[in-house]
Image (tube, coloured by chain):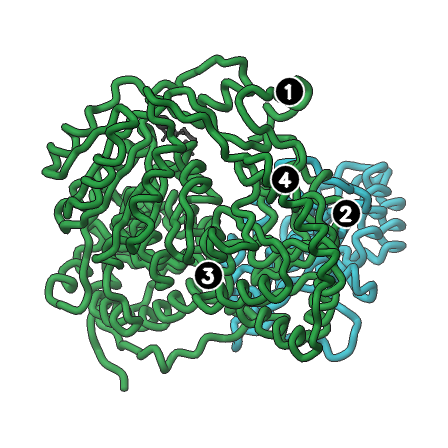
Chain colours: A green, B cyan
Amino acid sequence: MKQEMTGAEIVLQSLVDQGVEVVFGYPGGAVLPIYDTLFKQNSIKHVLVRQEGGAIHAAEGYARSTGKVGVVLVTSGPGATNVVTGLTDAMMDSIPIVCITGQVPQHLIGSDAFQECDTTGITRPCTKHNYLVKDPNKLSPVFHEAFTIAQDGRPGPVLIDIPKDVQFANGTYTKKENIIIPPHRLFEPEIFKNDKKIDEVVNLISKAKKPIFYIGGGCINSGPKAAELVSQLVEMTGAPATMTLMGLGVLGSSHPNSLGMLGMHGMYEANMAMHDCDVMINIGARFDDRVTGRLDAFSPNSKKIHIDIDESNINKTIKVDVPVVGDVSSVLKRVLKVWKDNNLKTNQSDLKLWWDKINNWKKIDCLHFTNNEKEIKPQYAIQRLYELTKDKETFITTEVGQHQMWAAQYYKFEKPNRWLTSGGLGTMGYGFPAAIGAQVANPDALVIDVAGDASILMNIQEMSTAVQYRLPVKIFILNNEYMGMVRQWQELLHGGRYSESYTDSLPDFVKLAESYKAVGLRAKKPGELDDVINEMINTDKTVIADIWVSKEENCFPMIQSGSAHNEMVLSKDQKQDKLSAEKGKILV
Amino acid sequence: MNKSVYDSPDNTSVSRRHILTVLVDNEPGVLARVIGMFSGRGYNIESLNVAEVSNDEHLSRITIVTEGTSEVVSQIEKQLLRIVPVHSVSNLDEEGSAVEAEVALVNIDLNETNKKKIYEICDFYRARKIENENSSIIFEIAGASERINRFIIEINQITKIEIVRSGPVAISTHKNTEEV
Ligand SMILES: Cc1ncc(C[n+]2csc(CCOP(=O)(O)OP(=O)(O)O)c2C)c(N)n1
Ligand SMILES: [Mg+2]
């Protein structure tokens, strides 16, 4: 049945039909009709942020912690340009977002009207797809297609730009069930045409002497079943497994086969095993440069299997031997079936030798740090945070910098969707609004943003949002008074010239919290840390915990730019050689 | 191999010309999406041609001539397929059995001394004179790009010309081609 309504009403009806419960947004002239319609209804909750950049990161946090689509509503011009960073972030980390932007009325488009910008033009490269809807009758088909595209295949952000006159005009609403999306506009998996690939996968794994699973964010995007299937496969084969920054939590940190994170600041044993393996099984990861290190030295002697839903990731930077294009869950189901049907086993004596080697690498104890009575070591702060929160329903978000890497290294994740960090884009200012989104979705959970003193200031205005909606988000600042990660690179690659990386004139974070009517806490000495963390957890309000940590601590282990997996720098006293420092300097 | 922060391990395969034909929904912005993918990812476009091929289904065919190693071109094809309104991408070069043609219009500076020679060349290349109100001497030549190149070189040696070229379009010679 079709119904006449205004464009703005169609927008709301489409959202309801899509099961949307909450929208993160900020009003303005070009979306007033939609905000008016929002005012007259009760099915959708609106969370008013304090800057549009906050809205989209909050939607990302909501999406990542639930697996649902995050929805954003902003005005034209500056509203739209403020979401560009978040759209790019969601594109890089494959997060399903639908972003609605207002546009000037159609007769003004192209006239440099007030708050006009070419939103679809600006966002074309940072969305999976975008639309400028000129006809109210097309609104509902566009919305339903947009929600499908955002979640389909490799998820990502979709933007819908709606001129103000279209929001006022009358049109007919078409229900979700009555929309037909042509198949070429969606992901078409190759896997179903091609079972031979599965045989090759199984065959390679069963014959491997030194296999390793390399697990990425695709195993989270594929849904809760995927993590289970990954564990099953890992256990059945007895092989070691390492996870990317995006994949943390797929295999529990305490799982005996887990080697933890790999890559630039990953575990020594994980990177060494990647380098030495004879069969690599990449599941839902994309050979990112933070993971591979120098390409010509990347895992030189292995056969590589790559399971990815996005065909463009296959052979993009690393040539693989067995590519399988498909959704992780459906591919792994087939792999497991063939494995079981053929009663396959890995060679236990080969595997034992492999594990012996790995256990030797583990003895290096790459996360070792020297604790200190006087200063709080940032690593220690994360260790204590983990110990004191591990029995709760906890979500950890982060900003970007050293604190992010320390959180990835020292916090232990046992479940997927509990770790929300900006990986591909590395967006400072992501963590706090993402925590707000995660808290909106999980009101009873403990949501902590592990932050840096510089990053937190990038979206500090969202304190108002957190307080307004009584969201008891915790901001745990590892305050080193530096853009620590920048300082570290300057120390290692630029002769210790700390150009503009000192964060001068920081606010008093305790007073800052109080000025927002939130709670501010501070720990200056190791002895104060546990009390502050406990008080933070037990306070049912928004909290900023300002943790003063060692100022010049570096994040290790590290594969420096231009180096290979087996050339990790382990601690401060080991300097890399001059030549690779020169080469590394030009890289990012 | 392809681009990365790091040097590629094996840059072995040779770079050469490829003709890609891309079938797309003829909707606003589709050409910008395709071109933007090329410029954004640093691929080159030597020529580009686009026109609707079926107006009842709103389909357009984009023909792109690009240059790259087979790895790069295969990456281009996959990136094209990620674009939502793209139906299909074929690399006609790889199929090795395609016909290509382009059209050029050439405005020739003609005088009594070069006239005879120029008409001979035009005849030889089957360039057709197009009558027009200003009685400028304009020839149309169609065919393989190579042939047009040679034609232009020869005329250029004799007199000044102004040229406009469509860039090649190409079609596979396989029977029963896809959709259109
Ligand atoms: C928006 C943005 N701008 C710049 C950078 C580059 N950058 C990466 S880490 C970093 C410093 C972060 O400092 P802080 O938040 O204090 O974290 P720390 O490294 O000290 O833990 C900067 C400037 C970035 N990642 N994002
Ligand atoms: Mg800092």
Q: Residues at marks 1 and 4, common chain?
A: yes
Residue underneath mark 3: A221
Name the amino acid, label 4: Trp
In this rendering, the label closer to the viewer, 1 or 4? 4
Q: In the rendering, at what x and y percent does residue A139 appear?
A: 32, 68
Q: Residues at marks 2 and 1, common chain?
A: yes
Q: What's the residue at 47%, 69% (across, down)?
A: A225
Name the amino acid, label 1: Glu
Instruction: Please rate how many residues cluster around mark 1, counting C-alpha atoms within 10 Å: few if below 14, some from 14 to 19, many from 20.
Output: some
Residue underneath mark 1: A582
Residue underneath mark 4: A361
Quadrant hosting ligand 2: top left
**Picture layout, residue A525 above or below residue B103:** above
Q: Is residue B60 visible?
A: no
Q: In the rendering, at what x and y percent does residue A387 appear?
A: 34, 44
**Tag of residue A301:** 2
Q: What's the residue at 17%, 58% (across, down)?
A: A35
- Going from the N terminus, do you reach mark 1 or mark 4 first? 4
Asked which secondary structure carries label 3, the reply is helix
Q: CA distance from mark 4 to mark 2?
A: 19 Å
